[in-house]
Image (cartoon, rainbow, N blue to C red):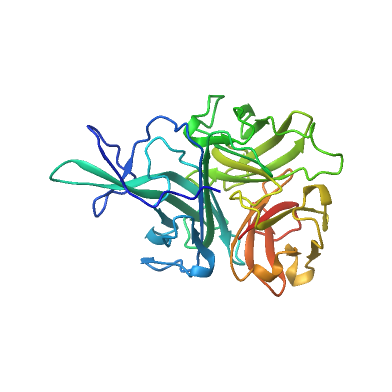
Amino acid sequence: MVTGQGRTTRIRLAALVASPVLAAGLLAVPPAAHAAAVQQSYAYVHADQPFALAYTPSAARNQNTSRSPNKVARIDVGRYQVWLPDVATTLGSSLGVAHVTAYGDAASYCSVENLDRYGYVSPVTGEVFVFGITVWVRCFDASGAPADSEFTASWASASGIAGGYSDFAYLTTRIADRDHDLPAETQFNSAGQVNKVKRVGTGRYTVYLHGLGSKQLPPDANRGHVQVTARDDRGRRCKVLTFGVNDENAQVEVACHNAAGERSDSRFSITYSRDTSLVWTPWGAYTRVSGGAVYPQWTYPAGSTGVTRGTGRDEGLFWVQTPMDGFMAHGNVQVTAEGTGAHHCKVARWGPERGIWVRCFTARGDTLRNPFLVSFAL
């Protein structure tokens, strides 16, 4: 795999678009045309100090292909900025895709507010130095009010046509309330085709990942995995309604809700991976859990993946164990709820002893059993 560039791009711009917060000379850099060359990079972090002003999270769960450590800052109650240095520093390269999942036992949840490049403008020469990617994260309590929370965030970027051992695609929508074309810089498809999104109703969308179907796969082949994250700053959540693979395409039905549990239009990001992690590396695991069971065709890698459901005080808690459990002092976990209703799920913790702990909640914050998709990347 090609790692993120470990250099700074120097450019001159006549006009600049500032990020939501302008401080210490940092700002967002407007993207240029989509790069034609194949590029690939990723980063992830476990933001485990929700009240800290600014810090560098533990290296065990803080990875970046540039080998520069990611950093996190708390901007306001429930609002954070994650800096991913030295990736996507070339204007025109893909902005990539970001996912975020709240961490812990409470019914909090998180979304991606924004994703852009950051850099510094010289007050003397007007030169712009591009430093990397910044992800703005919002977290909320069960009522939808801003709330400080731990979270896990992941980011991946690819451009060009890059076939190989696995399938991989992502996109981020630009408009919530109507169909629209997706910018090249915020989508990728390893089959070299264009992803499409159709709005089918309030808070309902169909995602078509063309060319990633099962026609060329053996009947017992893995069918892949998806994660969905709301791209929103007002407490909306998005989930997988249904997910399947036909001969030609992978197809995902997405549903979004507001904090009250009502269907609501929202932008969102989605990543599809087959036989690979959520950041397109072979070191990872995923599965689809429903009714206390896992499904081999939706599980990677093949092996002793299992799930235990909590009861009584642990209602709504699941322990998911995979062949990667021995590595789970490290890595990154993302979780997406599946099915009808406004339920949502999160990661409570993960580690070598019991694998990944997942908690699911109703829109009001009550615990319940609910289907979900869970992904681990190392």
- Residue closest to the eye, 147 or 377: 377
- Left or right: 20 as drawn, with respect to 252: left
Mark yes or no: residue 124 visible. yes
x, y percent for residue 372: 72, 52
What residue is rendered at 19% in x and 46% in y?
A: 122
x, y percent for residue 206: 66, 31
What residue is rendered at 75% in x and 28% in y?
A: 248
x, y percent for residue 124: 12, 45
170 relative to 355, above or below: above
209 relative to 166, above or below: above
- Left or right: 207 as drawn, with respect to 44: right
Q: Residue furthest right?
A: 219
x, y percent for residue 250: 71, 34
- Residue closest to the eye, 206 or 28: 28
- Residue closest to the eye, 88 or 98: 88
Quarter of the image where one finds residue 141: bottom right
